[in-house]
Image (cartoon, rainbow, N blue to C red):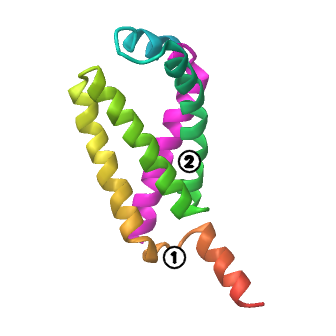
Amino acid sequence: MAYALLRVFLGVNIAMHGVSRLWAGGFQGKIEAQFAQAPLPHAAVAAFAVVLPWAEALLGVLILLGAATRVALIGGAVALIVLTFGSSLVQDWPAAGIQLVYAIAYALLLFLRGYNGWSVDAWVGRREGSR
């Protein structure tokens, strides 16, 4: 139960990061402005700002449901590494600190994945095992 609650909490949080950024609009402009002085190509920053909300929404829903959990958690952790790199590059230390909390949640969920019993993955596994 504890694993499922943490997984659902992280999934909702990450999915809503993506969904709210898609609904609200202006996310790409905000990121481009934040990274205007960073030593990164503008096109790379713009592309990342377009892809990130969709990736967060998808990964968050997968984590929430416990579907492709391992892949979703690794994908989320990789996205978080990229976000932490960016936050550190522009010296946004409060954001980098918060991202450490997310990193711990991802690491715990990956490490304890054997407890992922209340999930789509477990349901599919039980169903395939009964054939």
Residue position for label 1: 117
Which of 62 and 78 lies nearest the eye of the viewer?
Answer: 78
Q: Residue 29, how many percent across, how many down?
A: 51, 11
Q: Is residue 85 above or below residue 128?
A: above
**Residue found at x 53% / y 72%:** 118
Q: Is residue 53 above or below residue 63?
A: above
Circle 1 residues within 10 Å: few <14, some 14–19, many ≥20: some
Q: Is residue 13 left or right of residue 98?
A: right
Q: What secondary structure is marked by label 2?
A: helix
Q: Amino acid under label 2?
A: Leu
Q: For the view shown, which residue lies furthest in the bottom direction?
A: 130
Q: Is residue 92 left or right of residue 42?
A: left
Residue 96 position by quadrant: top left
Distance CA(mark 2)–CA(mark 1): 19 Å
> Sequence-wise, which precedes: disc 2 or disc 1?
2
**Residue found at x 72% / y 83%:** 128
**Residue found at x 23% / y 22%:** 91
Q: Is residue 95 left or right of residue 19?
A: left
**Residue found at x 27% / y 28%:** 88
Camera-near label (2 vs 1) is: 2
Q: Which residues are magenta?
A: 1-28
Residue position for label 2: 59
The answer to if 91 sits in the magenta stretch is no
Q: Is residue 113 above or below residue 84?
A: below
Q: Which label belongs to residue 125?
A: none
Q: What secondary structure is marked by label 1?
A: loop
Q: Residue 93, how many percent across, how many down?
A: 21, 28
Q: Residue 80, how many percent across, how many down?
A: 40, 41
Residue 23 position by quadrant: top right
Q: Amino acid under label 1?
A: Gly
Q: Residue 14, how many percent across, how many down?
A: 48, 42
